[in-house]
Image (cartoon, coloured by chain):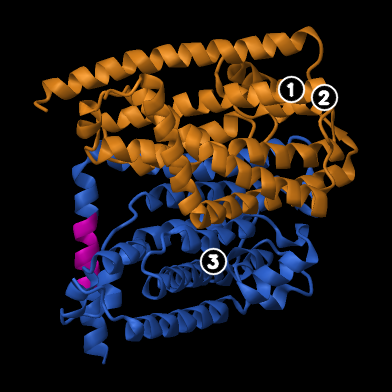
Amino acid sequence: MVNHLTHSLCLYCKLQLLQVRIHLEYRADFWIGILGVALTQGSGLIFIWALFKQVSQAGGWNVWQIALLYSLTIIPKGLTELLFDGQWQLRLLVNTGAFDRLLVRPLSPALQVSTQACGIHGLGSIALGFTVLASAVHELHLSWIWWQYGFLLVTLVSAVVFIGSLNFATNSIAFWDSSANGAFPFLIQYGIEFTKYPITLYGRFLQILITWVLPFAFVSYYPSLILLGKIGDQMWLASLSPLASLIMAFIASIIWRQGLLRYKGTGH
Amino acid sequence: MRLAPRQKYISLLLTAQQYAIAYRGTALLNLLSSLIWVTLAYYLWKTVFLTRGMLQSFSWHEMRTYIIVAYAVNSLFTFQSLMRMMNTIRTGDIASELLKPIDFLGSQLSQALGSACIEGILSSGIALLISFLFLDVLPPHTLLAFCFFMLAVCIGFLIKFLLGYLGALLCFFTLNAIGLVWAQTAVIDLFSGALIPIAFFPYWLRQIILVTPFQGIVYIPVALYLGKIQGIAVWQVLGTQLLWMVILWIIARVFWRVSIQRLDIQGG
């Protein structure tokens, strides 16, 4: 079992490195991708900056606290793009019948689909995110104890698991509707935008939606409460982040499995 | 029997309309994704306006209106239209396009207009629905303001189209179309006023934006709608918008010529 796991991990790394090499062959394109992503995420930051030129704080959050929250969202997002972007190819594979080829290989289909592509542009998000995170920690004069650094690591890892699992689950719609395009998975995953800002600013309905239905809030908002030292009755929810990610991973694996069972091929 | 030129472009426009109607599900999902941004902007600005009644001569009522009208205006030329233009060049379909007795710019414009008709109806419909159900937006300042608004929307659409066209021509020189799309969308969204009214940017940035065509896409039409621009200034902004449209059209023509010649030299 462990042997199988390490074997899979080894293969995953090798296949992903192949994808990375493909991207690095076209240097200009590589930098354009990173620039594109950096500009997209950066425009959100510019929005916050312009917003906070008008007021000094909003709903108990100042500009650097929101910047920290923002970075806690875009870092795992970038990492997920780096690791799990291949899932977006699933509908193309199913549509053209190429998925059958994957199924006859002695490798888990999930592994193969994940390594179909590498979102190298995610590096732009990661770099921007860490820069903003470091700046925010400096500006807010946050002095974290050792366990808070550990908590940051756990937060980022569980966020990557969460976003990656959601990616898996939503793109599996290709098994049910092979003519579907990426609009539906994109829409669901776009909900991550809600966690770039404190959810207390939203209406009640929305808060409940992104805490308990599509638990995006566990990606960055609740952990940020601990990292920013915002004491309150919602702090205990922060400890649930890893659990939320594990539940999402579990659900995603079920959806994936059901999709695979359903798959009959397009008859090529 | 040779078709007169005008019938060619009209038939392209109609085909694009039919395509948009056939794929209205996708169009709808993409519009919903944009609505996520609208929701975020609404709540964030609401929080900011709680502490201050008027900001940069915008009242909260006007700001709500701005967000929803900017959304409708910005949705006329979508991500999909931009990708379609880029994909024609990226995939090499441009070779068969060059064989057709149709001007490439003209054919792309016809298709963009065709899609815009349908997507415009969808986005306006959604905007009106939200306006009356949730947001209570302001009607146009005056009937005259509304006429200026519609004129500015048309010119703004053409500006956005031409900017997209220029971006698509860059696909002759790079493979990473999606990176270009992200970069272009981020810059245009930010500086056109789609994310934030230009008035909220600091003075130095406003001065820079004044010498670019971007604000003609969203900010000027919506400002006209709200009646923020009066008297002689209306003709000044419309004139500037028109001037930019002409400049961009000329640049598009020149760049096209340059790109095509380069294509030939590389052994096409």
Asked which quadrant contains residue B171, the reply is top left
Using residue B118 as the reference point, say whether residue A94 is left or right of it: left
Disc number at residue A152? 3
Q: Quadrant of residue B221?
A: top right
Q: Amino acid at mark 3?
A: Leu
Output the letter for the chain in blue: A
How far apart are labels 3 and 1 at the CA level?
54 Å
Q: Which residues fall within the magenta stretch?
A: A11-19
Q: CA distance from mark 2 to mark 3?
A: 55 Å
Q: Is residue A49 visible?
A: yes
Q: Is residue A15 magenta?
A: yes
Tell me which residue sits at (86%, 40%) in the image. Answer: B61
Contact (Cβ within 8 Å) of mark 2 with mark 1: yes
Left or right position of B56 against B77: right
Going by the picture, which residue comes out furthest to the right?
B53
Q: Which mark is residue B147?
A: 1
Q: Which chain did the renderer colour orange?
A: B
Q: Secondary structure at mark 2?
A: helix
Residue that appears at 34% across and 65% down: A91
Q: Is residue A259 magenta?
A: no
| Amino acid type, residue under disc 1 in the picture | Cys
Marks 2 and 1 belong to one chain: yes
Q: Main secondary structure of the magenta part?
A: helix
Identify which amino acid the numbered label 2 is placed on.
Leu
